[in-house]
Image (cartoon, helix red, strand yellow):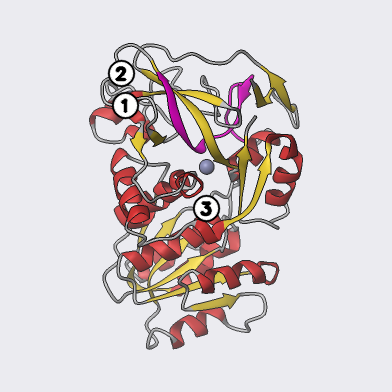
Amino acid sequence: MRGLMKTARGTGNLEIREVDNPRPGVNEVLVEVAAAGICGSDIHIKHDRSFYTPPVILGHEYSGTVVEIGSGVQDIEVGERVVSPATAYCGRCYQCKTGHMNRCTAQGKRILGVSQANGAFAKYLTVPEYIVHKVPEGVSMEEAALAEPTACIVHAVAERTSICPGDTVVVQGPGTMGLLAVQVAKAMGAGKVIVSGVSSDRWRLDVAEKTGADLTLDVQAEADAVEVVREHTGGLGADAVIEASGACVACSQALDFVKVAGHISLVGVRGQPMEIDLDPMIDKELTMTGTWGTLPSSWVTTLRLLSSRKIDVSPLITHRISLDEWEKGFELMETQQAIKVLFADLE
Ligand SMILES: [Zn+2]
Ligand SMILES: [Zn+2]
């Protein structure tokens, strides 16, 4: 089969390579990929800006059908439609035993499409049975391919941020993560969701409005964005702010947007140190949380939200491409002309 492989460290070094078809090992299933999304972290790997162990076929946001099962597989059958997190875990280390499987510290841990395991930008991949989740009926394979980023947002917003019914939530950054955060916050009962972005985000802010945002805010065009948030919250500030832009300036703005005793959830990664006045944390008695990846529970909630149509990820799929069009797909993501680009043909 062919796969989009990061062949060596350094910038670039990304190409389609011919490799042997994988076979499922003990307790593994062989999945034929139906759709796979390009993620910001794939862009970082392309530019050698994040962790990975080459050579590795990229791709960790996927859906597919099980075409073969390895020995020892108990609960998954051939023909089952499945998704999974990227990260396998050992179940034995301190982090696993204390419920933080997303931060498992086992040596040589498999991360699909990143480290020690080929990913989904190919016709097939093998996945350990214990991390697989079945796709509920009524959820399309394309929608299911967005289960991974959705589960990350479910972990950050539903599992780790306190949002009460009727709350006003500000989401910073209308990328895939921010737009998913809008829908998850609404599903949790948020009364009003305000999405902020910069002027070049205008078209993505329009998508936010179509997918549940009550108000969008161009922080470059608006003279006083903090004042706008106050106006919409009776002068109090937002109950919760989800920082999904990764911009340094958005962090200090989050401290201004949020109300006394409010909650800031950091989702966007900055990838660089920044200077910030943290005194508002004290003055306003704030809570700030960071989250990384997903827990098994995040997937259960995600698949329920998709199957009940409480959230609809399909408007976020802006482009479908074949494996041969990978350069175009990465370009669309990097230049923010796309929200989610899916490989829909992996032959
Ligand atoms: Zn991702
Ligand atoms: Zn572990």
Q: Which amino acid type is marked by label 1?
A: Ile
**Image mark count:** 3
Q: In which quarter of the image is the N terminus?
A: top right
Q: Mark 3 points at which residue?
A: 268
Q: Tell me what residue is drawn at x 40 percent, y 78 percent.
A: 237
Q: Earlier in the sequence, mark 3 or mark 2?
A: 2
**Label 2 residue SS:** loop
Q: Which amino acid type is marked by label 3?
A: Gly
Q: Horizontal and vertical percent for residue 176?
A: 54, 55
Q: In this view, does 332 lie to the left or right of 22?
A: right
Q: Which of marks 3 and 1 is nearer the N terminus?
A: 1
Q: Does the magenta stretch include residue 61?
A: yes
How far is mark 3 from mark 1, CA to CA? 34 Å
Q: Tell me what residue is drawn at x 24 percent, y 33 percent.
A: 98
Residue found farthest to the front: 79
Query: Callout 3 environment at 10 Å: few (<14), some (14 to 19), or many (20+)?
Result: many
Q: Tell me what residue is drawn at x 70 percent, y 58 percent.
A: 337
Residue 76: image tag = 1
Q: Horizontal and vertical percent for residue 299?
A: 34, 43
Q: Tell me what residue is drawn at x 33 percent, y 11 percent.
A: 71
- Place residue 43 in its image quadrant: top right
Query: Callout 2 environment at 10 Å: few (<14), some (14 to 19), or many (20+)?
Result: some
Q: Name the residue under label 2.
A: 73
Q: Which amino acid type is marked by label 2?
A: Val
Q: Horizontal and vertical percent for residue 163?
A: 30, 66
Give the foreground label among 3 and 1.
1
Mark 2–mark 1 contact, CB under 8 Å?
yes
Q: Give the range drawn in magenta.
A: 50-68
